[in-house]
Image (cartoon, rainbow, N blue to C red):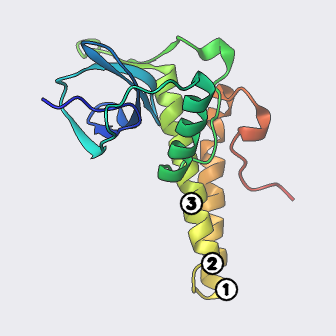
Amino acid sequence: MKILGIGSRINHSEFGKGVVTNITSKQYWVTFMENGLETIDLDADFEVIEAAENEVDTISLFDVESSLVQILKKWSDVSEIVPIGDKWKGGKLILQPEDTNLKPKEIKVEDFFHKITMVRDRLRVMEQKVNSSNLQAQEKTDLQQYITRIYGSLTTFNVLFKSKEQQFVGQKSK
């Protein structure tokens, strides 16, 4: 087994894409784009996107963070970090079926919030693609209206956002 060096990029089935930021005798410390810092065993199952040489180098934490931010911006379609409201941190969402014989489903609020913000980011990308497409003006307008209605449907989740500026906005009433 070849040990990856700091700066190697990987794709993990559970955590997604990330960069190796530290190595111990048993684990990689990997900062994942969608899940933050996680430790995974050296022999864990993951795809190596780009391996870095395992060289010992003395660099500051600031240098590592700066490099990591550049790498994540380069390889991610996520445009910003969106913080969840403080009161929801560590909370859980419980989906209780009406049938009491069925087991409820629990989801960490942070995981649910992450999915919601990913939907928003992908909607923004779709909106940009529509605006820059070769579609007819009327087709662009029609698609924009659908996107705006989707944003409107998602305003229910605004309660989860820490900052009002990052919340969903639907169609403004006239």
Q: Is residue 70 left or right of residue 152?
A: left
The spot of residue 7 in percent (x, y) is: 41, 36
Tag in front: 3 or 1: 3
Residues at circles 2 and 1 in contact by the CB criterion of under 8 Å: yes
Label 2 residue SS: helix
Tell which of 123 and 72 is nearer to you. Answer: 72
Mark 1 residue element: helix
- The image's mark for residue 106 is none
Q: In the image, what residue type sits under mark 2?
A: Lys
- Which residue is label 2 attached to? 140
Q: Nearer the viewer, mark 2 or mark 3?
A: 3
Type of the residue with mark 3: Val
Q: Which residue is mark 3?
A: 125
Farthest left residue? 1
User: What type is the residue that disc 1 sits on?
Assistant: Ala
166 to 112, vertically: above or below: below
User: Percent x, y for residue 58?
Assistant: 50, 24
Q: State the residue at coordinates (56%, 56%).
A: 123
Whether residue 61 is visible: yes
User: What residue is at 23 percent from the left and 28 percent from the top?
Assistant: 3
Sequence-wise first label, 3 or 1: 3
Q: Residue at x 26, y 12 (%)?
A: 25
Q: Answer whether residue 98 is visible to the viewer in this image.
A: no
Neighbour tally class for label 3: few under 14, some 14-19, many 20 plus, Cα within 10 Å: some
The residue carrying mark 1 is: 137
Position of residue 28 in the picture relative to residue 148 (left or right): left
In this view of the protein, which residue sits in the foreground, 13 or 147? Answer: 13
